Image (cartoon, rainbow, N blue to C red):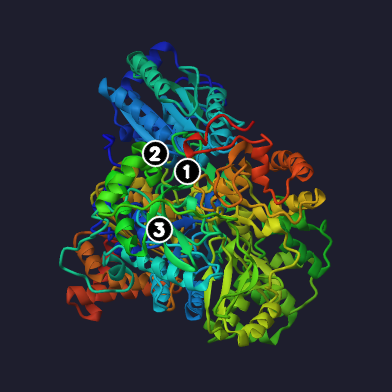
Amino acid sequence: MSKAPLSDVERIKSASRHLRGTLADSLVDPLTGAIAVDDTQLSKFHGIYQQDDRDLRSERKRARLEPAYSFMIRARVPAGVCTPEQWLNMDRVANLHANGTIRLTTRQAFQLHGVIKRNLKASIAGINEAMMDTIAACGDVNRNVMAPALPALSAVHRQVQADAERLSDHLTPATRAYHEIWLDGEKLDTAEQEPIYGDTYLPRKFKTAFVVPPQNDVDIYAQDLGFIAIVEGGQLVGYNLSVGGGMGMSHGEPETFPRLADVLGFLTPAQLLPVAEAVVTTQRDYGDRSNRKHARLKYTIEGRGIEWFRREVETRAGIKLGDERPFAFAGNGDVYGWQQDDSGRWHYLLFVENGRIVDSGDRRLMTGLREIASRHRGEFRLTPNQNLVVSSVDPADKAGVEELLREYGIENRSQASLLRLNAMACVALPTCALAMAESERYLPDLVTRLERLLAESGLADVPITIRMTGCPNGCARPYIAEIGLVGKGPGRYNLYLGAGHAGQRLGAMLLDNANEEEIVGALQPLFERFAAERRHDEHFGDYLIRGGLIREVRAGREFHAATAA
Amino acid sequence: MTSQAAGSLALPLDTTQSDKLAAAVDGLTPAQLTWVSGYAAGLAAAGSPGDAVLIPAADSSPAAAPQDTLTILYGSQTGHGESVARGLKDAAAAKGFSVKLQSLADYKPSALKRERLVSFVISTHGEGDPPDDAELFHEFLLSAKASKLDGLRYAVFALGDSSYVNFCQTGREFDGRLEELGAERLLPIVECDIEFAAEAEAWSGDIVERLPDLMTAASSAPRLRAVETAAQYDRQRPFTATVLTNQKITGGRSGKDVRHIELSLADSGLSYEPGDSLAVLADNPPQLVADLLQHFGFAEDTPVDADDGQKSLRAALSEEFEITAPSLGFLKAWAARAESEELNRLLGPDRQSELAEFFATHQIIDIVRAYPAEVAADEFTGMLRRLAPRAYSIASSHAANPDEVHLTVAVVRYEAFGHSHEGAASTYLADRLGEGDTVQVFVEKNPRFRLPADDNAPVIMIGPGTGVAPFRAFVEERAERGAGGDNWLFFGERSMSEDFLYQLEWQRFLKQGILTRLDVAFSRDQAEKIYVQQRLRERGREVYEWIENGAVLYVCGDSKRMAPDVNAALEEILAEHGGLSAADAAAKLKELRRAGRYQKDVY
């Protein structure tokens, strides 16, 4: 174990009495719209981030006013599945207490933004009214468990979804603090136990996903813990276990890097919970608790070796992993429009630019979805690409849903380019405290420019993934997008190219701290060469590697090696 | 006192005199020095006008860093800057030197001129921007507001990331600007990339090595400089003050526009105490002047009689006459001229409340529009009062801001009778004065609104809205004096996020323990409206205990509703918690008032 002193967050967790801290007092302090500094760490475990409007920061400081604090609330949606009632409830809370929009996240969760402190408690209570909660949506715990949103093989998908929900329940913190603080639950006298996490929880956030090949929509390689469904003869026989993926890094700190998960071996559905728990507790006991930038599972595995990790997990679980079973991925995007599953039900995958549910001109997404939810008898699925599936539509109701999609102008626009359909941006400015550059507010404009270039090169029907984040933590998983842009300063981004179209290979940095002209200037000749030299069905990232135009990154620790060719 | 040609700022003492004076003031406490400077100024004022008197070059405020202290100021985005600054502090402290470490976020920029020895640790982020916590200091330092820093010696340690274009830009700006202001650079600037530990250690070592010499040099007798004395300022002879700051201090979504105005009193000799008001000679709104000219069809250059001979009508309406608030005299004259039965009825007996309401809702232009009459220009101006200065409760402590006076001004703008209306003085200050412009002012003493002489006496301050202004002065003053008495403030406004005047300052005073308690009432942040008097009642028991323990009560702000409501709440508190009848409680409150323990500045 490291001899360096524990990070301050460890002190806060340790003293928090299982995540209580002074949150209850902070909520009623009338002199500030903020919560106490230590509580800002603890609130994350309750699904709440303190933020402030960064557009106003400077103006308010001059005005001798504190920043315009508000809170982001993230609601867990295990496997991304919610009922129409839950949708309507989220819509209600968003309009009553938040900024009137809903954000679908890259991890299949709901986010509400702009909730001020005195509305926090009512918002959390409101979300819970529809049997949905926010606990462990953020913080140093296992977060929302992801599962594929695409229902191509529905029997298998239903099983995978059930496994995802089972694991989500198993890894949810046991503390009653959440109920006490937000739902006026009874205060318990007895000493609480956190059987899996212990008193200080995990060293850092922990992300888990399930996936059903060939679509890698959840980006399994970006997860701390992954389960790749193995289907033989139409039956789910078990999962390949993957461990140690993660996107986040820090600019200028080469000991931090994005890393793709390793596949460790095979397990049966019955072995799921003990193996998952063994992975979590190994990270709990061996993860770096002194340096939070170096605390994810990926660094634990890098530091001690994958074979050590396998032995530790097998010992703890009392299970020997089987040999990895073969599988293949085709892409990490979404498949848009109507699909019918094997039971005859229909599913419409709806494009939601950057996951933002908002009425905008003729495209009345928020109102339209409210209308659909009030009549829909199936369910909704949030996709890992921030889109939405109007799911399990009875064939008799399909025409009605189509009518509503048209009426509110929200059907997938035929003019939306493939690049836009494969684009993803994090929230960034003005609310995210970590953002160094714009993302959600800017990517659509950059895409407009690039899609014109692609069309000019005759590449309009080639799917290329493009992702942007305002900081290097990588919420939109930019390092595994074929065009990855990571904010470094206002109007400045690092450009990463050469990642795999299915998220199976990291990109390499081509430009450091570049502005839009430099980015477009670098991409234009590459698009032209790609158009001229492309092999049949070849992806942009693969071409750049084959052509020797970009260095191939074979492992996360090579990510910062001398840049592009 | 040696006589010197008026206006000369050369040191008017020979060496012997200078040494004697230095010896005389050596060892005096800051409070004693302040007294001596006033004594000397008084001597000078009694002599022939224009004589120069001496004051110590370092403004003799207790907040001035002792001259044997190394001040370390840092601005840090990631915490690296802070760690370098702490490293230097530890290294200097280990050698037994007195060190003051402060974030630039908490450092009052104007205090820099009182420093003698400062080390800056400052990072640069983004495209050459200062870190958030140094943003305001940076802006101040680079602005025209920054004063000469002749007595300052400094060193700059700059942090940055060389992959950005403007590497260490903020550090370079600090370094260059400090020299430009006359400060003496002790060490060349150190510019560091992401790896900085070794350079930081070397830099600390360099500074600590020099400290023995620097500290001795710095602790020699105070240097003296000469200033011009000034006669007392009044309405006839106002002081021309320069605007340093005109800052809106309500949020972007506030329904109110409240300004924090800072004026320079540099070289004026003007002094004030907490509780005093500042009278401002404001011109009338140009639009209102134009509207009146247009309404009557007057030519703007029509000559009219004014105080100092004849003036153009436009100038007279701008500078000489009260053209917003109507007087009773005006109303009577206008009622006669317009032969308005309605106005005459209003002026009749037993119409006091209607008349008061009328005055509260009408400006002169509303009256001449609603009750039209033909008048000549000099006939109209003959009905008008002379333009009176507008007094604002001073929002600053002079001791804490030696060369400045601050005001808190609610800008009056509203729609009525189909036209937009403006308050004359508030819009003059807010809209028509920019930084660097000048304004005519003088101090109006307010001896009936004073902090207790006993620094240990507790005070309860009730100041909703801009009524909070004098309490900012009170709290600054008590902080400056190191007064031990408890300070409790009640503040109210509409919205916490938009209208919490001086929120950051109150939060800091609370953190520092200078403000003991702060209770707030934001009327529009919940379904039912809550005002300060309700908070007083809720805290009734403690308010009562404070009063029993000798607390002095202060109320500032609106006289029509707030002050009577607060008075009623205080009577109730005395009755309920003191076991008194309503009549006895009222009598007790009156007694407190007579004894000077319940003071009001209401308007």
The residue closer to the viewer here, A169 or B601, is A169
Tell me the mark number nearer the camera, choosing from 3 and 1: 1
Q: State the residue position of label 3.
A: A138
Q: Nearer the viewer, residue B482 or B510?
A: B510
Residue plotted at (62% across, 31% down): B165
Q: Which residue is mark 2?
A: A302
Type of the residue with mark 2: Glu
Q: Is residue B19 above or below residue B350?
A: above
Q: Residue at x 58, y 44 (%)?
A: A487
- Between the C-alphas of marks 3 and 2, the distance is 24 Å
Residue A258 percent across, percent down from the top left = 49, 43
Q: Nearer the viewer, residue B34 or B128?
A: B128
Q: Amino acid at mark 1?
A: Arg
Disc 2 and disc 1 in contact, CB within 8 angstroms: yes
- Give the Cα separation between the discs numbered 2 and 1: 9 Å
- Label 2 SS: helix
Residue at 45% x, 32% y is B112
Circle nearer the N terminus (2, 1) = 1
